[in-house]
Image (cartoon, rainbow, N blue to C red):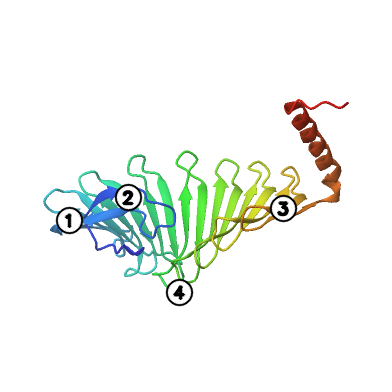
């Protein structure tokens, strides 16, 4: 299903509320036979310009959608709310303010679950998808798309309580993972970045950082068989690493019950 779901595709039956991240059809819907529509026109206080038009199923009385019009242009649509027949629950809003975007809602709580944003110059091209945490109602994940509107460029995962980025995943044009950066959820400082070979699975390099201040600590490079081929430690942390190595050596000696004669 294309990301663009036209407002006239009503009424609909909800099949599945949520789909995987990056899907361009977050809500799967099924068309039902087109009903006879009854419209109610709501005017603004001046009694001349239309504020919104509410559409109902003429037989059941179920609200199907509400079309909101621009304040200064009586013919320009500002937003369209879409509802699930028989429940009256809003599950989607299509916005046309500045650029096109679609808000989708959890049909149990009525809270927004994600927003699909489109290119200001091409309303069929997705630029990003924002997902929301139902408890805090804040953004928990942002998926950014390339100019084609189909392939993912970056996924940012966010701690909704602190609103800091905790993971940043970059993708190649082939959609394999290029790198994954992890951050301290409290202060937003980097803790580790992992780079992958072109298969997106085999680790090529790991950069470790001090999560308290974001300072670089260690660099490790691997071959395609997961064998370490290079290691560098920042001068400031070399003594700390030496202590760790000595501690590991002592533990190893005791575990093997070795004795010094």
- Asked if the residue under mark 2 is in contact with the one under mark 3, i.e. CB atoms within 8 Å, the reply is no
Taking the spot 17% from the left edge, 56% from the top edge, the residue there is: 32
Of mark 1 and mark 2, the one earlier in the sequence is 1
Within-10-Å neighbours for mark 3: few <14, some 14–19, many 20+: some
Q: Which residue, given by chain and number where applicable, does mark 4 sit on?
A: 121
Taking the spot 49% from the left edge, 71% from the top edge, the residue there is: 147
The residues tagged by marks 4 and 1 sit, at their Cα atoms, a distance apart of 32 Å
Of mark 3 and mark 1, the one earlier in the sequence is 1
Helix, strand or loop at mark 4 = loop
Q: Which numbered dot is residue 220?
A: 3
Depicted 102 relative to depicted 99: above or below: above
The residues tagged by marks 3 and 1 sit, at their Cα atoms, a distance apart of 57 Å
Q: Which residue, given by chain and number where applicable, does mark 2 sit on?
A: 91
Of mark 4 and mark 1, the one earlier in the sequence is 1
Taking the spot 65% from the left edge, 58% from the top edge, the residue there is: 223
- Asked if the residue under mark 1 is in contact with the one under mark 3, i.e. CB atoms within 8 Å, the reply is no
Q: Which residue, given by chain and number where applicable, does mark 1 sit on?
A: 32
Of mark 4 and mark 2, the one earlier in the sequence is 2
Question: What is the x, y in percent for residue 150?
Answer: 43, 66
């Amino acid at each position: 299903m294309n990301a663009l779901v036209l407002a006239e595709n009503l009424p609909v039956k909800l099949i599945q509320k949520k789909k995987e991240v990056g899907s361009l059809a977050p809500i799967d819907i099924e068309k039902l036979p087109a009903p006879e529509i009854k419209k109610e026109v709501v005017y603004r206080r001046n009694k001349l310009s239309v504020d919104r038009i509410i559409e109902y199923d003429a037989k059941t009385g179920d609200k199907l959608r509400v079309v909101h019009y621009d304040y200064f242009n009586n013919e320009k649509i500002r937003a369209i709310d879409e509802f699930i027949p028989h429940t009256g629950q809003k599950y989607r809003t299509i916005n046309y303010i500045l650029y096109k975007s679609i808000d989708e809602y959890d049909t149990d709580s009525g809270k927004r679950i994600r927003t699909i944003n489109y290119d200001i110059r091409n309303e069929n091209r997705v630029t990003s998808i924002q997902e929301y945490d139902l408890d805090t109602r804040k953004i928990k994940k942002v998926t950014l798309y390339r100019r084609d509107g189909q392939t993912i460029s970056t996924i940012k995962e966010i701690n909704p309580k602190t609103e800091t980025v905790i993971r940043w995943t970059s993708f190649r044009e082939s959609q394999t993972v290029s790198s994954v950066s992890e951050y301290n959820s409290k202060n937003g400082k980097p803790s580790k970045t992992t780079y992958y070979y072109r298969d997106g699975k085999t680790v090529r390099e790991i950069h470790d950082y001090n999560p308290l201040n974001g300072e670089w600590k260690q660099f490790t490079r691997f071959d395609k068989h997961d064998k370490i081929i290079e290691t560098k430690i920042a001068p400031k942390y070399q003594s700390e690493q030496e202590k760790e190595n000595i501690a590991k050596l002592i533990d190893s000696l005791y575990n093997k019950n070795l004795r010094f004669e």
